[in-house]
């Protein structure tokens, strides 16, 4: 039974930017075979741009 639902609209429970940076770093490392030719900074910048803080079309 669900007792509560939490919404973190202002980012107080989760630092989304730090979580996303960690995810991007891990993804670039795991997919290095395919992404190794792309500098990590360029990959990270483009990923963040496309993510649009989670407001992109799905």
Image (spheres, rainbow, N blue to C red):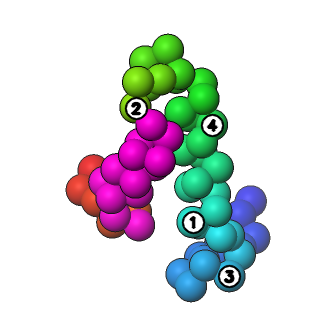
Query: Is 38 above or below relative to 6?
Result: above
Pointer 3 residue: 12
Q: Tag 1's secondary structure?
A: helix
Q: Tag 3's secondary structure?
A: loop
Q: Which residues are magenta?
A: 39-53
CA neighbours of label 4 inside 10 A, class few (<14), some (14 to 19), many (20+): few
Residue 12 drawn at (x, y percent): 68, 82
Residue beneath the point at 59% across and 66% down: 16
Q: Going by the picture, which residue comes out furthest to the top?
A: 33
44 or 58: which is nearer to us?
44
Query: Is 22 above or below relative to 33?
Result: below
Residue 18 sits in quarter: bottom right
Query: Is 57 above or below relative to 26?
Result: below
Pointer 2 residue: 38
For residue 55, side relative to residue 24 (left or right) = left
Distance CA(mark 3)–CA(mark 4): 24 Å
Q: Tag 4's secondary structure?
A: helix
Distance CA(mark 3)–CA(mark 2): 33 Å
Pointer 1 residue: 17
Q: Nearer the viewer, mark 3 or mark 4?
A: 4
Instruction: Choose the circle earlier in sequence order: 3 or 2.
Output: 3
Distance CA(mark 1)–CA(mark 3): 12 Å
Pointer 4 residue: 26
CA neighbours of label 3 inside 10 A, class few (<14), some (14 to 19), many (20+): few
């Amino acid at each position: 039974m669900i007792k509560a639902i939490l919404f973190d609209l202002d980012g107080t429970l989760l630092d989304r930017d730090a979580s996303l940076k960690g995810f991007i770093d891990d993804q670039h490392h795991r997919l290095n075979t395919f992404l190794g030719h792309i500098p990590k900074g360029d990959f990270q910048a483009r990923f963040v741009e496309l993510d649009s803080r989670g407001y992109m079309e799905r």
